[in-house]
Image (cartoon, rainbow, N blue to C red):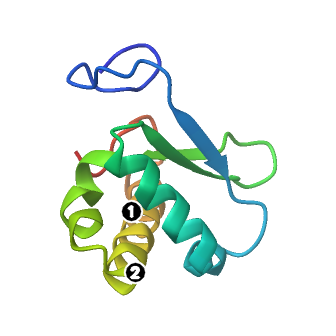
Amino acid sequence: MTQTGIPSHFEQRVGLKFQLVASLQSVRWEPFVTYIAALMEKKIPVFLSVPGPAGQDSRVVFLNDGMAAAVATRNSRQIVQELMRALEMRHRRKELTGSDNSASDLS
């Protein structure tokens, strides 16, 4: 993992981070799902950030590695399930450990 949070096996050294500002359910929005899947197919690193509680940092998840199989299917429902799983894993880690320092839950 590099300082940017992009794993070293990615040739592309610049990625995109999306910040959710609405409900976690907004990751189900079809244009969003289609867009991030297209970015991942092009091997562009994609991160998803969710605001933390007041006074705490946002939670950031690197999506590409853990979502590769779902993206390859081009099945929106499967992609959404993986997005929700990524967010749930991040939330659960924070609750269990009090720490949220990994940028790559799914790799």
The residue tagged with tag 2: helix, strand or loop? helix
**Above or below — where is 1 with respect to 92?**
above
Question: On the rendered image, what quadrant is the N terminus found in?
Answer: top left
Position of residue 88 in the picture relative to residue 70 (left or right): right
**Above or below — where is 73 with respect to 98?**
below
Residue 26 in the image, given as x and y percentages of width and height: 66, 76
First in sequence, mark 2 or 1: give its number: 2
- Pointer 1: what residue? 86
Question: On the rendered image, what quadrant is the C terminus found in?
Answer: top left
Three-letter residue code for mark 2:
Ser
Q: Extreme top residue here?
A: 3
Task: Residue at 47%, 19% (x, y): give it.
Answer: 4
- 32 and 82: which is toward the camera: 32
Whether residue 44 is visible = yes
Residue 27 in the image, given as x and y percentages of width and height: 58, 72
Q: Which of the 4 image quadrants contains residue 96?
A: bottom left
The residues tagged by marks 2 and 1 sit, at their Cα atoms, a distance apart of 15 Å
Assess whether mark 1 and mark 2 are in contact (beta carbons under 8 angstroms): no
Q: Which of the 4 image quadrants contains residue 23?
A: bottom right
The residue tagged with tag 1: helix, strand or loop? helix
- Pointer 2: what residue? 76
Residue 45 in the image, given as x and y percentages of width and height: 42, 36
Residue 66 in the image, given as x and y percentages of width and height: 25, 54
Three-letter residue code for mark 1:
Ala
Task: Residue at 38%, 22% (x, y): give it.
Answer: 12
